[in-house]
Amino acid sequence: MAKQPRYQNRVELLQGTLDMLILRTLQWGPQHGYGISRAIRAGSDEVLTIETGSLYPALHRLEKQGWVSTKWKLTENKQRAKFYRLTATGRKHLLAEQSRWEEFVKAVSGVMRPAETDS
Amino acid sequence: MRFFGWLTGRRQREEELDEEIRTHLAMAIQERIERGEKPAQAEANAHREFGNVALVKEVTRDMWGWRWLETLLQDLRYGLRQLRRNPGFTIVAVLTLALGIGANTAIFSIVNAVMLRSLPVRNPGRIVLFSDNPGESMGMGNGIPSGRQRTFSYPLYMELRDHSHLFQGICAFQTSEDTHTVRASDATGATVQVAQGQMVSGNFFSVLGVGAALGRTISSQDDRPGAPPAGMVSFSYWQNRLGGDPSIVGRSIDVDGVPVTVMGVTPMGFFGVRMEPHPPDFWMPLSLRPRMPLTMMPQAKSLLTSPPVSWLNMMGRLKTGVEKAQAQAQINGQVREYLMGLAGLKMTAFDRQQIEHAYVELAPGGRGLSALRFQYSEPLRILLVIVALVLLIACANVANLMLARATARQREMATRLAMGAGRGRLIRQVLVESGLLAIAGGLAGTLLAFWGSSILLALVAAKVPLDISPDLGVLAFAGGISVLAVVLSGLVPALRSARVDLIQALKEGSVSGGEKHRLIDPGKGLVVFQIAAAVLLLVAAGLLIHTLFDLENQNLGFRPDHVLLVGISPELAGYKPKELPSLYHELVDRVSALPGVRSASVGMQSPMGGGAASFMISVEGQPPSHRREVPQVVPVGPGYFKTEGMRTVLGRGISPRDTASSMPIAVVNQAFVRDYLHGGNPIGRRFSSGDVFKAPGFRIVGVVEDARFANAGEKARPMLFFSAYQLQSASIFAYVNEIEVRTAGNPASIGDEVRRAIQGIDSSLPITQVTTLTSRVKNSLGQQRAVSALTGLFGILGLLLACVGLYGIMAYNVARKTHEIGIRMALGAERSDILKMVVGQGFRLAMVGVIIGIAGALALTRFLASLLYGVTPTDPLTFIAVSLILIAVALLACYVPARRAARVDPMVALRYE
């Protein structure tokens, strides 16, 4: 029978990036899980879809790290939801991650560009 | 407290996670509806997009940490519920495991007590024994010591004690305990109590590091010639004989007429350093030895100064950092130098050679000197293997039960898998359940063991002061065995249950039909293994029981029936050697006159009375030789052979005319004629003590049949019988210890009359014990009896468990195949066909098991060889009998389910399911 999908494996591949994306989304203010996934999907022009099996473990992990804090609040539709908010250490972590990411992108682009001119 | 806080916090988070996910779904549905989807479709789509809720929760919870503990608690709760729901299964499984674990723990606690446990002394690892227990004791004789030395003279002890700088201290103690008469000063009555005393060096307690429970220990100050007599009593003697009175310290008790001041009481768990049936009641310094009136040993007066008399064992405490080998080399140098010095100028080349071959072997002494350890280490090792097999069979049973249940639970497992449970979780669930069973079984088994091991110990060694109370080692062993049981009994079912085929299992009605055919069905494999293991157990038991039977029915060389033995001690009563013949005459005459007495005699000991004194001799006209076995010596009175039922094969026995005034004579046994006289005519030949013949010596007047003297399993050893009436000059050969009485009726019934008759002659003559020769023979077979009884018991246990396993799997198969059987019967199969089919299946399993078991037994029984007597390890009778028994019992175990199968009503069976 088919192997059951294990979300954890994919989380590990994406871990750093997913955490960064979530933290980045929270820069605009506190948001609940559904809002975060919607924001990431919209922000990436529907390219990036965050599976719930990755999103919630990531959120709970970030909370455990102390990079986000949580609060139960009402949404504009008067629905009770758990809101995640960026903390000060979370902001610092985001900055560090972001510069690392930019370096990484630069490095990858440096490698990829000659190949592009060839073709 | 923190744990509960954590638990409640946990529950809250759980609820929050639920709500968070609910909100997420609600928002997604709402958005889809707003986009124009129908509510029902929106909900379905949102759920599909979200994925497996349970799994999302599970991986999210993973982030909280401590998850394994939480799920473990869940599994435990679930497991307990499952076990409660199937009480029949649970009881059988727990009982099976309890028997397996209990048997192992019981045997191990005896192993622990006999072989592993240390004496209650300080840092027992540093204590060494100057040569451990021997297989054979050395002859005393007057020869130069050679070979392994384990007994030492007092002067040699002093030499080693004072000049061995690698030891913190070396202490010495008498090789055997003496029986003393004790009168407490408060004299409750005129009767004399008999107590065991051991003579020890003054530093004995300080070297061992044993303190006093009361008062103080005896010290080197008490062990000087001329020091006031001091002693120490054991805790149990103080409690039982001295009334536990604390004021005993400083009081004096009368030991053989010498007033000895009690200095202190030893701690409760201290039984001395020799693990033997009668531990010492009190300890006295060695220097007191010459002042004690006992003359058991010939040169009693000169014991402290005479170099040739070896009467001490030694133990030492190594200094920290000193290796045993290093100390041993030093000691050996000192011993040889001492012996050379002793031999001096008279030393011949032969003597020198002997001395160079003398050595001491330092052995770990922290566990004391235990004959029991030597006697039982081999049987106990074998018993450990046997109970391990029982445990394996028990575990296989539980595994089988769980397998059968796993099949019944296939749908449950498949459902859990479909709901998103990981396979690892399912395996763990099954292991948790077997863990719960093993814990329950382990607890029950440990209780069983604590209760059972004292019974087992009574079988093994009745009066040895062994402490078999549970200690950490035993508990750890029980725990370890239980863990092993979890793995053994749970692994196969666990792996199996995780291999459930989802679709097949979830389909209605597929449970009985969808079973795939594997090469080896694990359940059947387990049953085959159980039967093979049971064959091994029964073969071992059969061989040992056959041995016991042979031992009990062999020709012992004497007739044990109708013989009463009454132990006496004229030595303790203060008889002088020259007064003995008239005492013996009077005793024998008085006892012989009693009604129901056929004959009576006196002797140093009877057959089965343990090892006799040995006596190095040289035969007239033969060169000295040290290679032959030193003969054993038993002084006896006239009529001894007739009373014991020993046949005189040549010449005559001891006669009343063999007295001090006549020529010293001896009667020898057949083994002596064979070993010393090379089968020539023995009558009239002469021998004397020592390694060179000295006239006039002893004249051989008769030969008796070889009798087993030390124990029933020994080979015949050369023996000499002297006349107890003849040798008053050598006191060691003048005192007898026993009156032997051959009776017409039950010997035990006239014990009291004989006792009264003896007391009528001299009321102060101590009677040490009254027993029969039959019970002596029985006791001497105690070890064989205990080992074969235990092996037989475990063999039967293994057989029963294996049969339960076979029965279980057959019954289960029949239940599962009810449908198939129904069809067969509907198609015209006779009941007898069904019966044959089911029994045939079981029989095939049993046969495979028996064949594997017999093959295994053929390969393994040679390890039993040291315990066998008169039976070869591949004894065909035993092998055939065991095979037949197993096949018969296996058929019986299959017959019941087969009958049930044959009674299947085809109509009911087809409607079934």
Image (cartoon, helix red, strand yellow):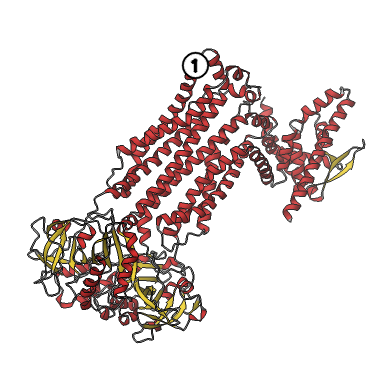
Task: Name the residue located 18 percent from the left edge and 64 percent from the top edge.
Answer: B721
Q: Where does the image place residue B465, in percent across and percent down from the top left?
A: 43, 64
Res. B209 visible in picture? no
Q: Quadrant of residue B647?
A: bottom left
Q: Nearer the viewer, residue B318 or B898?
A: B898
Q: Residue B895 at x, y = what percent?
A: 48, 28
The answer, for residue A44, to whether it is visible in the render is yes
Residue at mark 1: B830
Name the residue: 48% across, 41% down.
B392
Q: Nearer the viewer, residue B447 or A116?
A: B447
Q: Residue at x 47, y 21 (%)?
A: B837
Query: How many marks are shown on the rendered structure?
Result: 1
From the viewer's perspective, is B47 left or right of B79?
Answer: right
Image height of B627 relative to B534, above or below = below
B45 relative position to B104: left or right: right
The residue lying toward the viewer, choosing from B74 and B602, is B602
Q: Chain of mark 1?
A: B
Q: Quadrant of residue B52?
A: top right
Q: Which residue reaches farthest top?
A: B827
| Percent coordinates x, y for residue B736 in the rendering | 25, 70
The N terminus of chain B lies in quadrant: bottom right
Q: What amino acid type should be assigned to the residue bearing mark 1?
A: Glu
x and y, in percent, of residue B496 in the image: 56, 32
Where disc 1 sits, the SS reads loop
- On screen, residue B891 versus residue A55, left or right, reads left
